[in-house]
Image (cartoon, grey):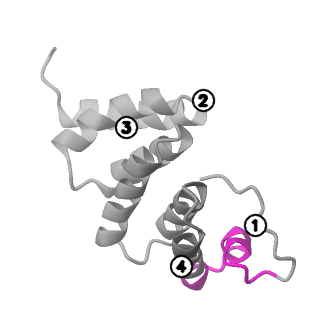
Amino acid sequence: MPERSPETHVIDYRAAEQLLAARDPRGAIRLLDSVITAHPENTAARLLRARAFFLSAQLRPAELEFQIVLEREPDNAFAHFALGRTLERASRPDEALRHFRLAAALEPRPEFLAAARFASNGDNGGSKV
């Protein structure tokens, strides 16, 4: 395999975004693994990989990645929301609600408020990560 360069990692990251948009989360994970190995501090790559894990129903790896993102960016409302969705899907609703509420407090977007049960209709709605 040829030597990887920073430019190659950017290309892999962008390709992973496209694979995720095309509903190929496992393909995205494969590309992101090498990016994160080379750049473990890259929070954007970790957030994208966490989403890919979630979409491929790999809930424990998704949870771990979202937690790493939140250790680095505790005010990342989307990461709280996505971790909440992950915990909800793993049948851990009390833990999920905590993250939904943090997401809604940080950024009062309608889907965050609904998930936090702050919306008047109480609909948790089928929001995607």
Magenta stretch in the rendered image:
104-119
Q: Amino acid at mark 2?
A: Ala
Q: CA distance from mark 4 to mark 1?
A: 14 Å
Number of residues whose C-alpha sits closer than 10 Å to that of mark 2, classed few (under 14), some (14–19) or many (20 or more): few
Identify the residue shown where x is 29% and y is 69%: 72
Dot 3 or dot 1: first in sequence order is: 3
Q: Which residue is mark 1?
A: 124
Q: Which residue is mark 2?
A: 22
Q: CA distance from mark 2 to mark 1?
A: 25 Å
Height in image: 76 above or below 104? above
Q: Amino acid at mark 1?
A: Asn
Q: Are marks 4 and 3 in contact (CB under 8 Å)?
A: no
Disc nearest the viewer among 3 and 1 = 1
Q: Which residue is mark 3?
A: 13
In the rendered image, which quarter is residue 1 located in?
Answer: top left
Number of residues whose C-alpha sits closer than 10 Å to that of mark 1, classed few (under 14), some (14–19) or many (20 or more): some
